[in-house]
Image (tube, helix red, strand yellow):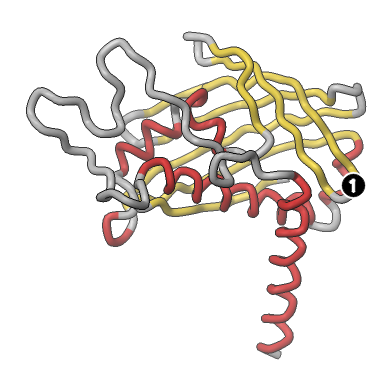
Amino acid sequence: MKLDQSFEVNAPLQAVWEALVDVERVAPCLPGAEITEGGDDGQYKGTFTVKLGPTTAAYRGTLHMESVDEASHTAVMRANGTDKRGQGGAKAQITSVVTEGEGGATKVDVSTDFTITGRLARFGRGGMIQDVSNRLLREFAQCLQRNLEPEDGPAVTAEAAPGEPAPFAPASGEKPPAFAPAGGGKPVSGLRLFFGALVDRLRRLLQRRKST
């Protein structure tokens, strides 16, 4: 299955780009994801838990940064995971392209080519996986927005005073702190995502009926 999605963040392109390619820093913004081990070779180990209706799947696997093109702001990641109970697995290649949007915003286009086997595979036929993926991406974008542009402060800019690091950059030799998780400091539950996806689907159905 292939999904093409996009979102915008009201923050400078460079700030968004640096956050997206820093997997350990940005992982808390994806509900259900946790990085358990990171390496300098661009490969990370972690877990991902998702709930669709009565079905919960917890995956353990790896994510590898295959390429990071600073010039075109294009990153390609490959993820592989197996169900902790041995009931299936998932593979995905994720390509993210960061470009300048309108009004100073930054646009991120995400293309995901993935395969799912096991208990969650049956949800792909009804479109539920796509609905939940859209919801996850929305939560992810909102989390980026909160972390890159504080509500009670000015917008994050890519410029800094002479001799000082940019607002989104760590001090020399230090790693930037991980972002605050999605949901205002609390992980977003799979149940909430599931019902949120249902609401989105019902809203689309109602809009279609009104237009006919």
Residue name at image x 77 percent, y 27 percent: 59
Residue name at image x 71 percent, y 30 percent: 48
Is 211 positioned to the left or the right of 64 in the image? right
The image quadrant where one finds the N terminus is top right
Residue placed under numbered mark 1 in the picture: 122
Q: Where 174 falls versus 50 (above or below)?
A: above
User: Pointer 1: residues within 10 angstroms few (<14), some, or many (20+)?
Assistant: few
Residue name at image x 30 percent, y 22 percent: 170
Quick one: SS at disc 1? helix
Is 184 positioned to the left or the right of 93 in the image? left
| Residue 69 percent across, percent down from the top left | 38, 28
Q: Quadrant of residue 199?
A: bottom right
| Residue 122 percent across, percent down from the top left | 90, 47
Is 183 positioned to the left or the right of 58 in the image? left
Q: Which residue type does callout 1 highlight? A: Arg
| Residue 11 percent across, percent down from the top left | 33, 48
